[in-house]
Amino acid sequence: MIEFIGKFHPLFVHLPIGFFTLLAVLELLALRPNWKELATANRVILLLTIPVSLASVVCGWLLAWGQEESSTLAWHRWLGTGVAAAAIILWIVRQRGWMRTYRRWLCATLVLLAMASHYGGSITHGENFLSWPKSPALVKTFSAEELLAQSAYAAVIQPVFDKYCVSCHGEKKSKGGLRMDTLEQLLKGGDSGSSLEPANSTDSLLGKRIALPLEDDDHMPPEGKPQLSESQLAVLRWWLDAGAPVDKTLGELKPTTEILTAIQSAIASASTKAK
Ligand code: HEC
């Protein structure tokens, strides 16, 4: 039940963002003598920001219930709670008719709201969400020959892990005790031991987890997160079945034409879309 209510957080959060933005715009307009009547509307909007902010905060706390507290989550949590508190204070200040204080506080609340939203965005879309898209010129393209001389692990496998797994299995978060950000960490394994042994796609923990149906709680990456493409899955399976080698080149692993095509598209999609 708690979890269910929490799921409404992503829906509710957009209401305070919309209401506060609208309020700020209308308050600016209300400064002009011929738009004075807006003052009444603004009181109603301000009043409405209180229940919607409180609803987002309550759902947000429920959603994060029992989750590991990362620093991003902590910032988001407290900035968001601050916005709800600010809505109540703004209401009191405005009711008292302290308009100058009210306008200053409203500006401060917008800053608070922007920061809370940014941290919220980082939680759902990843830390690098706002980073500039990589220039296409920087994306490596290989001829077949060059491609075959690359290390299978470094050129194909690690980039896929970087894009789809490291947000939860990295330095900052290591879910299930597993880190996949470096080869050394990957080989250490997680809480259940090695994820790569026995080194084939059906018995290794990693192979099993990525092959589970999406609805399965153990499926990786978890439902709702960006999922591996068909070609990336095919390439990971192929690499696991080759014994999960970390120092062999692609050529040494003798990929079939089919796998080679899959490798090329796996590389392309792991590197072109910005993380
Ligand atoms: C949104 C976060 C998230 C992402 C992204 C993610 N995982 Fe996980 N992973 C978890 C959590 C949480 C656990 C621990 C709970 C569990 O075992 O289900 C876990 C556990 C695991 C385990 C078991 C570790 C052990 O030793 O018990 C493996 C293997 C694994 N993940 C592989 C992957 C792979 C491969 C990817 C990328 C294709 C991936 N995960 C992406 C959250 C994530």
Image (cartoon, helix red, strand yellow):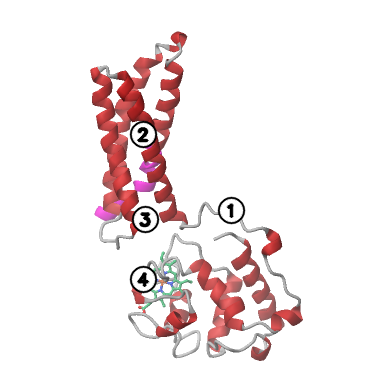
Residue, disc 1: 132
Asked if ligand 1 lies within 8 A of label 3, the reply is no
The mark closer to the camera, 4 or 3, is 3
Residue, disc 4: 175
**Viewer can see residue 1:** no
Query: Would you call the spot at circle 2 few (<14 residues within 10 Å), some (14-19), or many (20 or more)?
Result: some
| Distance between the alpha carbons at the discs numbered 4 and 2 | 36 Å
Asked if ligand 1 lies within 8 A of label 4, the reply is yes
Q: Who comes first in sequence, dot 4 or dot 1?
A: 1
Image height of 22 relative to 270, above or below: above
| Distance between the alpha carbons at the discs numbered 4 and 1 | 28 Å
- The residue shown at (51%, 54%) is 129
Percent from the top left, x then y, of residue 259? 66, 80
| Distance between the alpha carbons at the discs numbered 4 and 3 | 16 Å
The part of the image, by quadrant, that contains residue 168 is bottom left
Region in magenta: 1-16
Q: Who comes first in sequence, dot 2 or dot 3?
A: 3
> Is there a contact, CB below 8 Å, between mark 3 and mark 1?
no
What amino acid type is highlighted by mark number 3?
Answer: Thr
Percent from the top left, x then y, of residue 138? 68, 64
> Is there a contact, CB below 8 Å, between mark 4 and mark 2?
no
Residue, disc 3: 72
- The residue shown at (31%, 29%) is 48
Residue, disc 2: 108
Query: Would you call the spot at circle 3 few (<14 residues within 10 Å), some (14-19), or many (20 or more)?
Result: some
- The residue shown at (28%, 34%) is 86
| Distance between the alpha carbons at the discs numbered 2 and 3 | 21 Å
